[in-house]
Image (cartoon, helix red, strand yellow):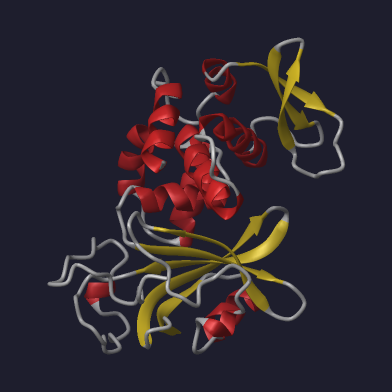
Amino acid sequence: MIIQVLRRARAATAAFAGPPPVPLERVAGRLGIVEIRRVEPVGDGAGARLEEADGRRILAVDRRIPPRTPQWNGLVALALAQTLLPPGPGGDRGDELAEIGAAELLLPARVFTPVAARTDLTMDGLRDLALRFAAPIRLTARQWLRTRAWTGFALLWRPDGRGLRLGWRAASPGLRFPAPAVIGAPAGAIWSAQSRLHATVRTGRPHHGVEEVQTGAGVAWWFTRFGVVRDLGRRSVLALVVLDRRGAASPRRPPEGNVAWSAKRRPAAGRSGAPVGAGRPS
């Protein structure tokens, strides 16, 4: 299904040859949308929705959202991505497919990949990419993972009054999430120590280092970068997890600053080919 969605998204952006950001109005036309119309907000809070009017397909967008901003682009891309989905998938799987399609519409791989390959794997680097493509952070992180420039996870943590809980996640192609990394899980289910995570929340400044984590199959060590982001209008913390391919069943804690954990290094394949710290498939 992913291949089908990506193929359709790439066909819709094939005519785009200029520098980013992608003109979504033209992409919409290629997908059969005759107009993107600003409308009064509706009660469902969706922000954007597809409508049929006199046999024509209209994309209605909340007029309170400024056009062509990252928020507006993200909402429009997600709505357009609904036209790319095959019948059947719904729920979390449908949402994931829509995000994959939206990321490809807004950050086309043939344009995004060479730019991302030259970008430092840091929170500043992620923000620079998002700014350049006028894209939301979560779509930018998802597309960056799909380029295979690095192997790992993007995990978004949101405050809910009882601490931080996992509100969104993305992984490199073919990489399974560890069993505890389910949506709604408390931070303590994964991070053995949460000092860097909470320091990021408290200070608003990025933090990074090697973290002890619970994978469901034992303890592992993840090189992680934490940074405060705005997601759906809420202050949240994004964790970018960089995994090293070593093939060890029970990896030892790597020393801080080890060059093997350099953000610019593409992880090498170990004998097993499995990323350390990924845990067993859930």
Check the picture and name the quadrant holding the C terminus. Answer: bottom left
Q: Tell me: residue 243, above or below residue 13.
A: below
User: Percent x, y for residue 161?
Assistant: 77, 77
**Residue 79 seen in render:** yes
Q: Quadrant of residue 272?
A: bottom left
User: Percent x, y for residue 196?
Assistant: 53, 81
**Residue 108 seen in render:** no
Q: Residue at x 55, y 34 (%)?
A: 81
Q: Is residue 95 left or right of residue 179?
A: right
Q: Is residue 203 left or right of residue 7?
A: right
Foreground: 183 or 151? Answer: 183
Q: Tell me: residue 222, above or below residue 7.
A: below
Q: Residue at x 57, y 85 (%)?
A: 188
Farthest residue in the front direction? Answer: 88
Q: Is residue 180 left or right of residue 242?
A: right
User: Percent x, y for residue 55?
Assistant: 71, 11
Foreground: 1 or 204? Answer: 1
Q: Residue at x 45, y 70 (%)?
A: 225
Q: Residue at x 82, y 27 (%)?
A: 39
Check the picture and name the quadrant holding the N terminus. Answer: top left
Q: Quadrant of residue 121?
A: bottom left
